[in-house]
Amino acid sequence: MIIVNTGNGKGKTTSAIGQIIRALGHGQKVCLIQLFKGKSFYGEQKILQKLENLSFFNFAPKHPYCFGNKGHQAAKSECLKALKFVKKVAKGRKKYDLVVLDEFNIALRDGYIKLKVLLKVINELNLKSNVIITGRCAPRLLITSADIVTEMQEIKHHFNIGIKSKMGIEY
Amino acid sequence: MIIVNTGNGKGKTTSAIGQIIRALGHGQKVCLIQLFKGKSFYGEQKILQKLENLSFFNFAPKHPYCFGNKGHQAAKSECLKALKFVKKVAKGRKKYDLVVLDEFNIALRDGYIKLKVLLKVINELNLKSNVIITGRCAPRLLITSADIVTEMQEIKHHFNIGIKSKMGIEY
């Protein structure tokens, strides 16, 4: 099953984290591959690193947008490393019940990963795992391939009245 | 801060669970109060019960809709117990950084809890905690009071082509 969490609202990654906790609770094996999230900036990363049956990997810790629009080439090269790793997971012997590709839609949007290539890998993963892809701007073809698609739509957000991101809420 | 996860799509509760994991990762104290979710049916419940700094409570385990539309009175009485408990949390000495009221929008929708009463308690809670309220059909007044509102909008769901709920995905 292919699940996509997209849209401009809050809840895409946190919902994927919730799905991971749900799957782990049933004794399922989970692989989480994150892009652009650092290694221990987000609170959940500190908990996830300790959970049994969860393999957790990070690539491209710094998105150029958050770091002065520099380093597009470095980000692209890191995303391609991540893609290579996902291919290995898809072809590997280890069976995960759930594979989460966090923020991979952003890597597609920014041209770091080609949609056609990622779709092929997702379809391979889908032969043995449920797959969740998160990030705003999910491309139409990914939506067409998916079984469940949710658009997290921002109705209201405190950022819009100038409030900065808060620990425990946004990170 | 008051956060509302609503809409007909997937991700309202799982996103709240992700927020809990995020907050716990920063050493924050969290209180989760669930309605209509049983006690160990959902995978996440098995993990959440074991996490440090999380107080986890269940009320009204059976929603009448899922159990043959019987027992509205019992569900209402359980929801009122839950409300009483939330009031105790709001007035209590223990300081939670985050309080999650899972599916309380459903208790409002079905008339088990009065909006005016719940809003008062939420505003009290909000003096010392971040508060997340989940469930479809969030009422307009709750949205007005909130700082962040996300509508989880269903773009596509496998239920609609007759596929039943799956372990690790829907529960």
Image (cartoon, coloured by chain):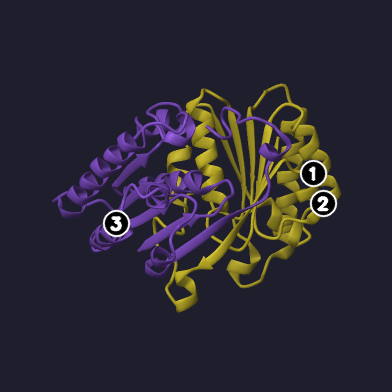
Chain colours: A purple, B yellow
Q: Position of residue A100 (x, y in %)?
A: 35, 49
Q: Position of residue B87 (x, y in %)?
A: 77, 36
Circles 2 and 3 in contact, beta carbons < 8 Å: no
Q: Do tags 2 and 1 sit on the same chain?
A: yes
Q: Which mark is residue B141?
A: 2
User: Along the line of sight, which residue is nearer the eye, A114 or B30?
Assistant: A114
When asked about the image quadrant of residue B76, the answer is bottom right
Structural distance between the alpha carbons of marks 2 and 3:
43 Å
User: Along the line of sight, which residue is nearer the eye, B62 or A83?
Assistant: A83
Residue that carries the numbered disc 3 in the rendered image: A118
Q: Position of residue A110 (x, y in %)?
A: 40, 48
Residue that carries the numbered disc 1 in the rendered image: B145
Helix, strand or loop at disc 2?
A: helix
**Which residue occupies the extreme right position in the image?**
B116
Helix, strand or loop at disc 1?
A: helix
Circles 2 and 1 in contact, beta carbons < 8 Å: yes
Residue A37 visible in image: yes
Structural distance between the alpha carbons of marks 1 and 3:
41 Å
Q: Chain of mark 2?
A: B
Question: As drawn, is A136 to the left or to the right of B8?
Answer: left
Q: Amino acid at mark 3?
A: Leu
Q: Amino acid at mark 2?
A: Leu
Structural distance between the alpha carbons of marks 2 and 1:
6 Å
Which residue sits at x=26%, y=58%? A117
Residue A117 to residue A147: above or below: above
Q: Position of residue A112 (x, y in %)?
A: 33, 47
